[in-house]
Image: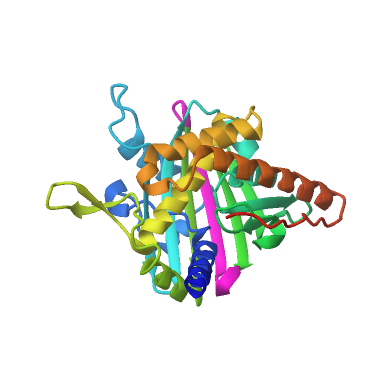
């Protein structure tokens, strides 16, 4: 029994650290847009990004007669050998583009937003000549940054008129993962902002741990893409790596959305809004109670504030680790 529990904890820890940064890609077939693996898209200029995003928005997201007959986001994922490429589009209504840029054009805004994700245990930004941020990733229960794994991202932001791009890049991650490339493109539209997230990374030997988890503890978890129907006509959803990636990026999407829609409210209110938003898709995203989530995030936010303050003083800080009931 003890061996079984230890094995399960090892599998869960390894898996979540591998996939915590794997957002999902929008299906090219559904959106009528570029291929996930198209290198030209990843190298396009801001003007080219704006033209492409506006075309996608007009075709798939624009309101017609005041009714939007679709989910407020599109999501899917691609697992090609050693590389996971991912992509999602979503629309933020009634968000001023300048305010959007003010939040997500700064590393501080990213840290404040990403902490809402279950697996983000903290984030520290450094606004120096070469801006960067350190993202601390861990399990879904409460952990201090020192108990989790930190990944250092180089932060780069560009804006040109009504389009912006923010890029986070990291050479190395946990469990042999590497070559992280996280990109957000956004364009000003009608009465809001149309946003694209792109992500890719090399899985390394962590891919074997992912497969092991998905064939054991994670085999019942589902994503958002419908892949067929049951004998009774009910939708059947994607499982495996793709399903995990879809769950992950939707959590990040809601973190960005909530941080913008509730940008003038305290972190506690944004955490409440994040949990309520994800519970609308409980079949995919539910993990534990609202009270437990808010308690965990209140503690982790307090830790993040301490780490950030110490970083600004050029110091380090250590949060005491207490034995706890997981």
Q: Nearer the viewer, residue 134 or 210?
A: 210
Q: Is the residue 307 above or below the residue 218 in the image? A: above
Q: Residue at x 52, y 52 (%)?
A: 45
Report x, y in % for residue 9: 52, 66
Does residue 264 appear left or right of residue 13 in this picture?
Answer: right
Query: Which residue is most to the top?
Result: 65
Query: Which residue is most to the left?
Result: 231
Q: Nearer the viewer, residue 276 or 32?
A: 276
The number of numbered discs placed on residues in the rendered structure image is 0
Q: Is residue 175 magenta?
A: yes
Which quadrant holds the C terminus?
A: bottom right
Q: Residue at x 49, y 61 (%)?
A: 19
Query: Which residue is most to the front?
Result: 1
Does residue 77 appear left or right of residue 322 in this picture?
Answer: left
Report x, y in % for residue 101: 61, 37
Asked which quadrant contains residue 24, the reply is: bottom left
Report x, y in % for residue 146: 72, 60
Q: Residue at x 48, y 29 (%)?
A: 192
Magenta stretch prevailing secondary structure: strand
Q: Is residue 198 visible?
A: yes
Report x, y in % for residue 85: 43, 62
Q: Which residues are magenta?
A: 173-192
Q: Nearer the viewer, residue 103 or 15?
A: 15
Q: Is residue 163 visible?
A: no
Asked which quadrant contains residue 116, the reply is: top right
Q: Is residue 228 magenta?
A: no
How is the structure coloured here? rainbow
């Amino acid at each position: 029994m003890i061996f079984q529990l230890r094995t399960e904890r090892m599998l869960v820890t390894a898996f979540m650290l591998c996939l915590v940064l794997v957002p999902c890609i929008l299906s090219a077939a559904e959106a009528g847009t570029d291929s996930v693996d198209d290198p030209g898209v990843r190298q396009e200029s801001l003007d080219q990004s704006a033209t492409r995003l506006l075309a996608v928005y007009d075709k798939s997201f624009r309101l017609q007669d005041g009714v939007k007959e679709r989910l407020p986001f599109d999501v899917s994922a691609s697992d090609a050998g050693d590389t996971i490429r991912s992509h999602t589009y979503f629309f933020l209504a009634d968000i001023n583009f300048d305010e959007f840029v003010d939040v997500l054009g700064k590393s501080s805004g990213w840290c404040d937003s990403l902490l809402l994700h279950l697996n983000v245990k903290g984030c520290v930004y450094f606004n120096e000549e070469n801006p960067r941020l350190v993202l601390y990733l861990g399990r879904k229960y409460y952990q201090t940054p020192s108990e989790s794994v930190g990944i250092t991202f180089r932060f780069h932001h560009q804006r040109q008129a009504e389009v912006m791009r923010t890029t986070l890049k990291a050479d190395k991650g946990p469990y042999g993962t590497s070559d992280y490339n996280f990109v957000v493109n956004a364009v000003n539209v009608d009465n809001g902002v149309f946003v694209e997230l792109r992500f890719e990374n090399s899985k390394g030997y962590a891919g074997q741990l992912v497969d092991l988890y998905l064939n054991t503890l994670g085999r019942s978890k589902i994503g958002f893409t419908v892949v067929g129907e049951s004998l009774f006509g009910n939708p059947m959803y994607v499982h495996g790596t793709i399903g995990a990636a879809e769950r992950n990026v939707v959590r990040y999407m809601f973190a960005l959305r909530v941080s913008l829609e509730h940008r003038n409210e305290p972190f506690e209110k944004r955490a409440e809004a994040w949990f309520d938003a994800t519970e609308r898709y409980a079949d995919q995203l539910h993990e534990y109670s609202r009270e437990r989530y808010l308690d965990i995030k209140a503690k982790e936010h307090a830790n993040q504030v301490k780490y950030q303050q110490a970083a600004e003083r050029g110091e380090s800080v250590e949060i005491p680790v207490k034995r706890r009931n997981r």
